[in-house]
Amino acid sequence: MAETSLWMQKVAADPGHSRWYIERFRAMARAGDDLFGEARFVDAMVPRGARILDAGCGPGRLGGYLAAAGHHVVGVDVDPVLIEAAEQDHPGATWLVGDLAELDLPARGIAEPFDVIVSAGNVMTFLAPSTRGEVLRRLRTHLAAEGRAVIGFGADRDYDFAEFLDDAAGAGLVPDLLLSTWDLRPWREDSGFLVAVLRRQSRDVS
Ligand SMILES: C[S@@+](CC[C@H](N)C(=O)[O-])C[C@H]1O[C@@H](n2cnc3c(N)ncnc32)[C@H](O)[C@@H]1O
């Protein structure tokens, strides 16, 4: 069994954390805040009706938008309270409780690979560090041959960008494009955020 994610360790220490997180985003949505920049980025990458995996989807902020835009969305998150909120707020997608370190969607009846896998909102930095490589490897195996993974997280969160890119390469994912924001600013060595668009290194690597 995979080491417990840092997110679930946080929830164990503070059982109200998931509810707080859900309400925080619901309040922002009620206030009319723009919560969809990452989703618009993903929407621009694919034609209508694409297959999109929201990896570490939380309460469905991004997957919900993408499903409403006409894509086939599967969201997976390790926190059952967040998945329950996603089901309530965004019924147009498929929401599943699961640890990305054990991701095996064909075993759950979802055999077709994905055109895009998006992992936004610092998900990478909430994984148990020992599982990072395995998570990236599993994301790659769920990508279509020409599919791309889009992963965004901030600096100073105990996961160096260089280490992440090494882990991704070890998992068979190589960068197509590195940005520093979801509104398409270029990435530089001193950027405080990374949005990495990754593709499968080789079609014949399984
Ligand atoms: C800050 S939230 C971001 C949620 C969502 N991606 C968003 O941007 O709105 C981080 C999420 O990562 C999820 N997460 C962390 N480790 C995970 C793992 N091993 N498997 C699945 N989800 C995980 C948490 O449960 C949490 O929902």
Image (tube, helix red, strand yellow):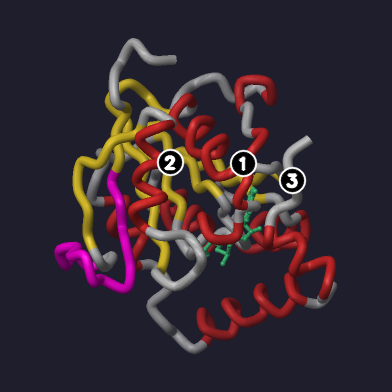
The amino acid sitting under disc 1 is Leu
Magenta stretch encompasses residue 192: yes
Q: Which residues are magenta?
A: 183-197
Q: Is residue 128 above or below residue 71?
A: below
131 or 90: nearer the eye? Answer: 131
Question: On the rendered structure, is 18 left or right of 189?
Answer: right
* Location of residue 143 with respect to 23 vertically, above or below: above
Task: Report if residue 164 lies within the magenta region.
Answer: no
**Location of residue 83 (image quadrant):** bottom right
Q: Are marks 2 and 1 in contact (CB under 8 Å)?
A: no
Query: Which residue: 31% across, 58% down?
Result: 195
The residue under label 1 is 100
Identified at 16% across, 67% down, the residue is 185
Please rate how many residues cluster around mark 1, counting C-alpha atoms within 10 Å: few if below 14, some from 14 to 19, many from 20: many
Q: Amino acid at mark 2?
A: Asp
Q: CA distance from mark 2 to mark 3?
A: 17 Å
How many residues crowd mark 3 within 10 Å: few (<14), some (14–19), many (20+)?
A: few
Q: Residue tagged by mark 3?
A: 3
Question: N-terminal of the two: label 3 or label 1?
Answer: 3
Mark 2 or 1, nearer chain start: 1
Is ligand 1 within 8 Å of the beta carbon of the residue shown at mark 1? Answer: yes
Helix, strand or loop at disc 2?
Answer: helix
> Which residue appears at 21% of the width and 65% of the height?
189
Q: Quadrant of residue 190?
A: bottom left
Question: Which percent across, then down, holds residue 68?
Answer: 44, 53
Up-down relation of residue 10 to residue 134 (above or below): below
User: In front: mark 2 or mark 1?
Assistant: 2
Residue placed under numbered mark 2 in the picture: 167
